[in-house]
Image (tube, rainbow, N blue to C red):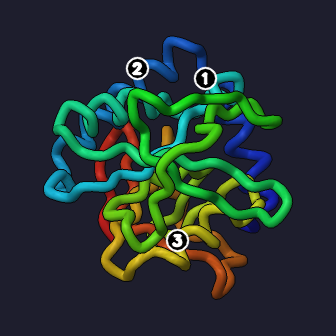
Amino acid sequence: MLKKDLRVIFKRKRNSLSENDCKELSLEIANRSLNMAIWDHSNYHIFFPVEKNNEIDTKLIIQIVQGKDKNVVLPKTNFNDKTITNYLLTDATLMKINKNGISEPESGIVVTENQLDVVFVPLLCFDKHGHRVGYGGGYYDRLLKKCSTKTIKVGLSFFDPIEKIENITQSDIKMDYCISPNRIYKF
């Protein structure tokens, strides 16, 4: 199936989830993340959810990262050039809601892409080969291209994989793992 069709289908599927479903499934995903061999690194990039879009509550994973005394790195979207700047989350970090309803840092300590050890990647769906469908802006593909080849890429999804995304391009970056409420997928 094509990305544009998958976006429509999986936005609809996600929007059909109740608030309680989202909470329970997000907790399952966060708990599954604890079973991964990714916790011996330092810098963990993770996005804040857009709750009105029924996105995964990543604040649970942020709590895990902080509980392990690791660095949480948050994205700030630059809509002009479709890039992401990474900021270290500290007690002094001021957060602001952007035009898409995403809470992100106003400013702070910049973390370069090659300093990111693990990147939790938002997605609408993924396939059995580790390819993902996001919202279509290419922000995370551009971010991941700049990361070290050792950076671990972890997709987060309420749903299990589809068989295959048909229109994958060279600019699409594969995930190393995807976590769904049912299991962890390794690619």
Question: Label 2 amino acid?
Answer: Glu
First of labels 2, 3 by sequence position: 2
Residue 45 x, y percent position in the rendering: 43, 52
With respect to residue 154, does 183 lie above or below?
above
Q: Crowdedness of circle 3 by 10 Å Cα count: few (<14), some, many (20+)? A: many
Q: Crowdedness of circle 2 by 10 Å Cα count: few (<14), some, many (20+)? A: some
With respect to residue 43, does 59 lie above or below?
above
Q: The N terminus is located in which quarter?
A: bottom right
First of labels 1, 2 by sequence position: 1
Q: CA distance from mark 1 to mark 2?
A: 11 Å
Pointer 3 residue = 144
Element type where label 2 sits in the image: helix
Pointer 2 residue = 24
Which of discs 2 and 3 lies nearer the camera? The answer is 3
Question: Label 3 amino acid?
Answer: Leu
**Residue 129 appears left or right of 43:** right
Instruction: Give whichever of 120, 17 is nearer the camera.
Output: 120
Pointer 1 residue = 17
